[in-house]
Image (spheres, rainbow, N blue to C red):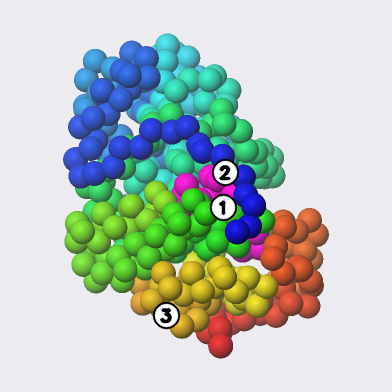
Amino acid sequence: MMPFTYNGLPSRVIFGQGTLAQVAEEVRSLGGSRVLVLSTPEQEGQARQVLDQLGELGGDVFPGARMHTPVETTEEAMRALASLGADGVVAIGGGSTIGLAKAIALRTGLPQVAIPTTYAGSEMTPILGETKDGLKTTQRTLEVLPETVIYDVDLTLGLPVGMSGTSGINAIAHAVEALYAKDRNPIVSLMAEEGIAALARSLPTIAGTPADATARSDALYGAWLCGACLGSVGMSLHHKLCHTLGGSFDLPHAETHTIVLPHAVAYNAEAAPDAMARIARALGVEDAAAGLFDLASAVGAPTSLGALGFTVEDIDRATEIATRNPYWNPREVEAEGIRRLLADAQAGQRPA
Ligand code: NAD
């Protein structure tokens, strides 16, 4: 057996249907007496539902969370927090809203309860990405890990079909890269394989029957496992490419992950045969890269970067940025291979 190091992350996870009803109890057990509820403008209605559930512990709603955690938004939320005299935050939403809660925790040390409504997985990670003057920087510190995460399947029933598919494959990407991470370990690899399998069997059902509670439960369970993988081990080429495409070409987060993943996997296939076998087993297919491409097609997700507005002319600049400070990767990151990978992803070519 390969030697390994495993770090457990200290967070409390509550999973089920109707679990939002436990939010007041959870806030109280973290010592909260008056909390600020965070959301995007689109999810203010759900945030008000949380405020109602909180009863006397609910202070106010800050419905201003935005993509990429801009520091100006965090500063605005900090002012709302101070004027309320809040002693904790509750975030309801996807990675953008949970990012805001993390940014507040970093600055104040206040406890957070995260209630995820997408499959992105930020709630399980000690990672925070913030944007200042158009520049996104990422840090890893336990100070931003939410103390408590409440997964309530009911809150995901209305996640639009398109976003369910891409967000679910975004989650799968964390598990895929965990299986070939430099610091992979047996526990995280078990979670990764189980997470991929749970999402792969549920996402196509959700695409056809979005309110199927069993499929939604499987998907959220898979997203939890995949988020835990992202929080535990290092990511490689796929995440680097997605950060490049999101940061420098402004491509949307979950869709970009969905399109790039099969191609990043194809690039790494020969260098990580054990990981490929586990991914293929979890998907129930012969070939991991082709299986991921077919899963994206099955959930109706876009399969070409061209469809997101990334052009053939963009390939050289993206290659240059992505290869500048590469993350560790099982296969050497070399420009010609990355250019080919991006060309395939741009065109929406199914990996052979
Ligand atoms: P998001 O949080 O940006 O949400 C996208 C939109 O969907 C928002 O308008 C949101 O309000 C809406 N939405 C969310 N859940 C909904 C639901 N159930 N029903 C209807 N609408 C809903 O999207 P995301 O993909 O969850 O997060 C992406 C962001 O999170 C990126 O900025 C990414 O970098 C970050 N992220 C960070 C980490 C980390 O570990 N730090 C991990 C994953 C993602």
Residue at the spot of label 3:
285
Residue 335 lies in what quarter of the image? bottom right
Q: Amino acid at mark 3?
A: Val
Question: What quarter of the picture does the N terminus occupy?
Answer: bottom right
Q: Is residue 142 left or right of residue 114?
A: right
* Residue 179 horizontal/vertical position (percent): 55, 61
Residue at the spot of label 2:
6
For residue 346, above or below residue 68: below
Q: Is mark 2 within 8 Å of ligand 1?
A: no
Q: Nearer the viewer, mark 2 or mark 3?
A: 2
Mark 2 element type: loop
Residue stretch rendered in magenta on the structure: 226-239
Residue 206 lies in what quarter of the image? bottom left
Tell me which residue sits at (78%, 78%) in the image. 336
Tell me which residue sits at (44%, 62%) in the image. 193
Q: Between disc 2 and disc 3, whose residue precedes?
A: 2
Mark 1 element type: loop
- Between residue 135 and residue 261, name the one nearer to us: 261
